[in-house]
Image: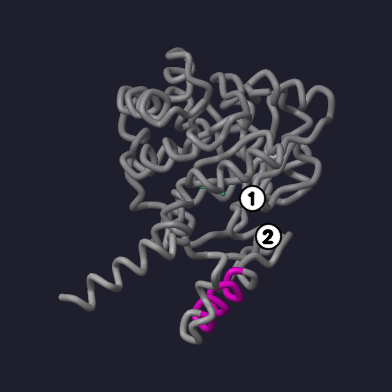
Amino acid sequence: MKNTVSTLLKQKQTGDKITMLTAYDYTMAKIIDECGVNAILVGDSLGMVMLGYENTLPVTMEDMIHHTKAVARGAENAFIVADMPFMSYQVSVQDAVINAGRLIKEGNANAVKLEGGAEVCEQIRAIVNASIPVVAHLGLTPQSVNAFGGFKVQGKSLENARRLIDDALKIQEAGACSVVLEGIPAKLADIITSKLNIPTIGIGASAGCDGQVLVYQDMLGLTIGHTAKFVKKFANAGDAMRQGITDYINETKAGTFPAQEHTYSIDDDVINELLKEEKSE
Ligand code: KIV
């Protein structure tokens, strides 16, 4: 059954943890959806894990629409959330509504996600007024990497922690249907979760959040190089892929691939006739 805003809210109320993973293409969306994940995030992390950028800042609306469309074709039941890329909502409320609308109309997303607290409440209110569900994102918000001076845990000082609690209450009041809490201390995530009526989805936050989200390349062991402390590797798909590709190279070079079962047959009569014709030419 299709997961909706109401499904996620009910999960918070009943204590049934929300599962969310990122996906950026049809095949992965189909696999993740078939496993029964509640929500798929087409994150602007695609800039890093799919396009090879250093951070999420260069991602465009066109990138997001292209990948969201593919995910929507693959996911039947998961609630699809598409990220609003950097500068698609910060400049004006009008921009925010137009761009959120594009992710729904052209990308076939069910909701949009944007980063920030009090400073984006006007945008959240206007997008929700256009009947588009909004997931907020607080804490270590990657689009603020330059302002933070790196990917740093947020909310450690009293002032910062107070501000995050205040932001969470404000985005809820503005109409957000859920909030991603990224890179904040576990005890702070627990306080925020207990104060909100909307579900919190943690990444580098706390098991006490109403749900969790991870980037699929990280949790399947596909990420090359450093991963954040909060990443748990649930599988080693990278090694399985490397082994498969190496076997393909070796068997192709040895001439053992393709084997007979991978090839198509033809009637001997046809071949004999062809060979006769070849000889007589
Ligand atoms: O872009 C993304 O994948 C995200 C998650 C890390 C929450 O925003």
| Quarter in which the C terminus is drawn | bottom left
Residue 179 against residue 128 in the figure, above or below: below
Amino acid under label 1? Leu
Expressed as whole percent of the image width and height from the top left, the position of residue 1 reads 68, 23
| Mark 2 vs mark 1, CA separation in Å | 7 Å
Q: Quick one: SS at disc 2?
A: loop
- Please tell me how many numbered marks the rendered image carries: 2
Q: Predominant secondary structure in magenta?
A: helix
In reply to whether residue 22 is colored magenta, the answer given is no
Expressed as whole percent of the image width and height from the top left, the position of residue 129 reads 46, 13
Q: Is residue 149 left or right of residue 232?
A: left
Q: Which residue is disc 2 drawn over?
A: 231
Numbered tag placed on residue 184 in the rendering: none
Expressed as whole percent of the image width and height from the top left, the position of residue 104 reads 42, 25
Q: Quadrant of residue 4?
A: top right
Do the numbered discs 2 and 1 sit on residues whose CB atoms are within 8 Å?
yes
Q: Which residues are magenta?
A: 241-251
Q: Which residue is disc 1 drawn over?
A: 214
